[in-house]
Amino acid sequence: STQSTEVSSVHNYNIIGGGIETKMEELAVDKAADESQDKNGSVIDDPNGNTALKDDDITYESDYSLRIPISNVRFRGSHLHVIDTDHDQIILKQQVSHDDKQNKTTLVRRLSPITYAQRSLRIGYSLITIIFVGFLFVFCCQVLLFLGIGLPVNADEAWKIPPMHLVSTLLSIPVLLYGLTSLMTMGCAFVIDAHRGGALFRSTVMEITYLIVFLIAPITTAMICLMSRSEQPWRITALVWAILILITFVGWALAVTYKEILACFLLVEKCFPLEEEEPSKVMRFLKIANRALLITQTKRYSGTRRQRYLVAGDDLTKTYTDSQLTPVESRTRCFSRLVSLKCCSTINTYESVDPPRKILEADEIMNYRPVMTKSNWSMQKYWCSGDSHQRTVLVTGGPSALSGEQMKFSVLCTFTSVILATLLLIGVLVWMEMGVAIYVIAAIIALLCCVYPLFVNSREMLKLYDQLNEGNNDEEDDERGSNTMMNVWERVVISEPKPWLCYAFVAFEVVFFFLWPFISMLVLKNGPIGAVFFVLGFFNFLWRYFDASSVLSKYGSISDAAELFTEESDGITHNKKYRFSQIVGGITNNKG
């Protein structure tokens, strides 16, 4: 018989070596299944490129959130399962207790194999790349500054700015802002990847490249300058260092963009295959690109509604939109209300989606659902969590349950942050002497849009917590795992644009936000800004219209899509799945 359950509810964990401080995704021991009677600790090759390890009827499978698959090691007669993260090493060891019950337990040990020298080296990598990103930020600000300076420079003698010049400058701002913010997102991701030793594209070539760029080249340059008694050795060394880091960053960003677009096309080809096989590779590529563009544009301009449900953790429902549950809260944007009107269907621009269809959001695509227990709860974590606390699984029963005081402090912390932010906004308005009417309007808006919904949300959460707590049995929870509750937000599509309207939006954006400003810059002989605008506009087109996360939001999570690919037929290995999850989760969703 096959029985899938969480490992934490099957075994009792003994934590030694300082405890586990990594994320649940990094632990990545997702499922344990009694699937086999084989107890020889053999290794099973998973068809998707993962590695499943068998030991005492327990199967450990490597999730895509792990950069390195789980390793099976034989050491002193024991079978060890080694999980490597960026900073730690988790070792799982199956053992049998020496008492009369002979219970099977899993011993979890956390080690830190990184030496102080390696930590210092990575800190050096991080500091240098942070300085580089600082110069990148200055460059982005200067581009916007020079764009604004161009207005008075081209004014006539009466200081009147030509209307067409003013309009073209305003139209260029969206592309520049989106491109520059995406560039800064790339820069921040580059800093994180450098601190992790180039983990995103980890290979021998990348290891050698990082050593040359960050160590060998600058040290060699400084040595040559000092031996030749140069007057400014530090300046020459810094210039060579900066040029090499710039080249590395450009290559890294191009590789990320290429992998993102390639992943988008592969997902479209597998998740939404063409109805007819196309023999011509060029036509096949164009059809896949067309479908990717339509999927991205349809998601971007669809009318949606967000619905919130408060559910217990033992509820097995995957899509609450299709269930009989009534949402606690429902939010519909003004744009979604507008495109859902009957007149939009009448003029053949939008069509209603009945029943509403669920689409996945970023955290659902990544299967991100952190667990909050009484041990890892903290005021600082809750204060800095932002909206992520709304997707956290709260433990309400058993030895790991949050106490009533912790729940109340969580609510108090959230209320305090909202009230302080509101008072800070009102303080800024007072400092600007906007007037009493503006202060009152700002306070009313904050009360209706922030404080009151937060009060309702907190009241419902505390009510569900009390209900689950009343039926808790600590002895039962200790054996089968603690009870949990979670706040579930689901986004559903209520209206979709017609394909012709999607193409019209693309044409409008390209003509008015790219071609018009670019031609205007060429006419005004603003070459440097025009070149930057053209490069950013080109990559904006790729980032905006070929979005892999939009494809996944319509099809399913990364785990669902990973089942469509195999290493034998598609060449999709565990490392490629990890790289794609990092690009989608850490870069794509933060652009713009």
Image (cartoon, grey):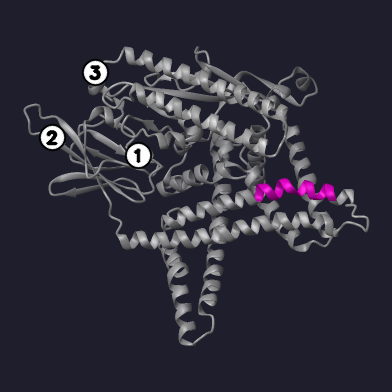
CA neighbours of label 3 inside 10 A, class few (<14), some (14 to 19), many (20+): few
Nearer mark to the viewer, of 3 and 1? 3
Q: How far apart are labels 3 and 2 at the CA level? A: 22 Å
Find residue 526 and report its horizontal and vertical position in percent: 79, 61
Q: Position of residue 504 (x, y in %)?
A: 77, 37
Tag 1: amino acid: Ala
- Packing grade of label 1 (10 A; few <14, some 14-19, many >=20) is some
Quadrant in the picture for residue 444: top right
Determine which of the numbered discs, if any, sits on residue 476 in the image: 3
Q: Which residue is mark 1?
A: 28
Q: Is residue 429 magenta?
A: no
Q: Are marks 2 and 1 in contact (CB under 8 Å)?
A: no
Residue at 26% x, 20% y is 477
Q: Amino acid at mark 2?
A: Val
Looking at the rendering, the stretch of residues picked out in magenta corresponds to 166-179
The quadrant the C terminus occupies is top right
Q: Which mark is residue 1?
A: none
When the figure is inspected, residue 120 is found, relative to residue 263, above or below; the finding is below
Q: Amino acid at mark 3?
A: Glu
C-beta proximity under 8 Å, tags 3 and 2: no
Q: Nearer the viewer, mark 3 or mark 2?
A: 3
Horizontal arrangement in the rendering, residue 508 relative to residue 556 (left or right): right
The residue sitting at the right extreme is: 158
Q: Quadrant of residue 351?
A: top right
Residue drawn where x is 37% and y is 30% of the image:
372
Q: Which residue is mark 2?
A: 96
Residue 360: quarter of image: top right
Q: Residues within 10 Å of mark 2 (few under 14, many from 20)?
A: few
Q: In the picture provided, is 582 more to the left or to the right than 533?
A: left
